[in-house]
Each structure stands twice: as C-alpha cells, then as structure tokens.
Amino acid sequence: MFSWFSSKQKISESLKLTTDIHSHLLPGLDDGVKTFEESKEIILYFKKLGYKKIITTPHIMIDAYKNSPASILGKLSKLKTFLSAENIEIEIEAAAEYYLDQELMNSFEKDEKLLTFGKRYILFETNFLTEPLNLKEFIFIATTKGYTPVLAHPERYLYLQNNIEKLEDLLNRGVLFQVNVSSITGYYSKQSQQTARKLIDKGWIHFLGSDCHHLKHIQLTEEASQLKYYHKALSLPLLNNTL
C-alpha cells in the first residue's frame, strides 16, 4: 500500500539542514557547555550530521545570565581560535537568545546594539507559563525598528499549547517560529511534541533548531532525523539554509 511517509521520505532524502540557528556552545556563558572540549565534541557531531554552519545563541537574561554582545563575541573569538588549533573547519557565528524582560525593552529604548543573525532576525524566548503582558509591545517595537522577531521553541510554552488562535495571531504580527528538533521526538513532553506536530502540519515553522546545550541534544537531532514529522518539516520552506 502506498504510504505518505515513504513518498515524503524519498522526496526529502536530498534535503538536509546545513545551518543550525539555536545552541549554547560558548563555554561558561550560560546553562550550555562548560568547556571548549565539550564544544568540540558537539561541533564534531554536528559536522558528522552534515552541518556546515552553526549560529550559537547564548542566553541574555538579566536575572540569570548577564551576557552582552561584547562578552559573547569575545568568547566566540576564543572558540574559533580553539577550533582552528584543533584543525576543525566549520563556519560558526554568534547571536543571542534574548529573554523578554525589562532589560531587553530598555535596550530597544536606548537603541543598543543587539546580536542578530541573517536578515536582522532576533531570537527571543518568554516565560513558559503565561503570556508576558508586554509581548505585543515587544513585537511592535522590534518590527518598527527593523528587526524580525523569531520565537524560540513556541511548542514548549504552556500558554501557546492548544491555542491555535494565539499562535496565528503572533504569525500575523510578524513573528517567525523556530521549533526545536528534539521536540519532534517527545523529549520535553507529549504536549510539546503534539504542538510541534500541529505547527508542522500547518506549515507554521520557519526554522528548526537544535537548542543544543549538551551532547544528548545533538544525539536527539540525529534521532529525530529518522521520524516522519522531521521529514515533513524539511519539506517546508525553512530559512535555515538561506543564512
């Protein structure tokens, strides 16, 4: 019997993600890797999976990770030096995963330099339980200033799960969605997995990201590549490989 999966899998065999846009691979800056050796192990795994470019995104969160563009770019330079000494060739850049807090809003007010990727895409996250009161204000200000907001892992927020109307409203306001590859495997929760599937079914994702903090996450990326919904996601016009 003809199956959807077999046909889609054949179509997508030639499609591969070659750019990852969400990870935590700069040692000691946040809850990601702690050493350059850890970074090396994960980056070699990315290379094994066919990735050519990594845009790593340390947290910037005033209450937990007080990083700045200067500290992030400084650590990026050290990582590049380390990889070069190890004869590991891969294109690596840095942006940030901004937490939607008052410090981020203040940065817009002051017109401070923000770390973005591609066409002024700004990766951001919110608290996981309730919609921030300033979410719509943030989106308006960011887009007015020429940024394109990219919401990290929308499938993981409780206030967005089972809320198609809210997700569609964010899209209509100009927000792009980045789904975690590991969500497709059910790693975070069944609810996150189901929401990721709904977003894929509707074609409402623009980026896939590893959100890699440690070796397990990149291993999950490999595991996800065997699943139907990963191949269905790859059939969408994702923006990863345009960067």
Image (cartoon, grey):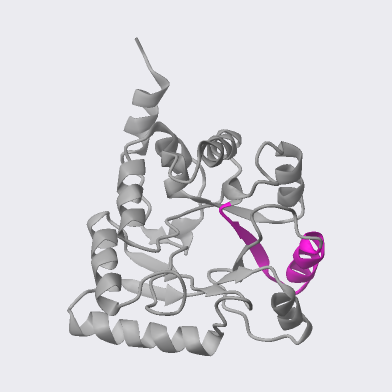
Residue that appears at 79% across and 70% down: 141
Instruction: Answer whether residue 140 is magenta in the image.
Output: yes
The percent position of residue 199, horizontal first and vertical second, equals: 59, 39
Q: Nearer the viewer, residue 137 or 52?
A: 137
Eyeballing the image, is 181 above or below 90? above
Q: Report the span colored magenta.
A: 134-153
Residue that appears at 55% across and 78% down: 65
- Taking the image as shown, residue 141 lies to the left or right of residue 150, namely right
Residue that appears at 46% across and 63% down: 21
- Taking the image as shown, residue 213 lies to the left or right of residue 87, namely right
The percent position of residue 167, horizontal first and vertical second, equals: 70, 45
Number of numbered discs on residues = 0
Q: Quadrant of residue 96?
A: bottom right
Q: Which quarter of the figure is the N terminus placed in? A: top left
Eyeballing the image, is 161 above or below 113? above
- Taking the image as shown, residue 227 lies to the left or right of residue 194, namely left
Eyeballing the image, is 191 above or below 145? above
The percent position of residue 103, horizontal first and vertical second, equals: 71, 79
Residue 96 visible somewhere in the drawing: no
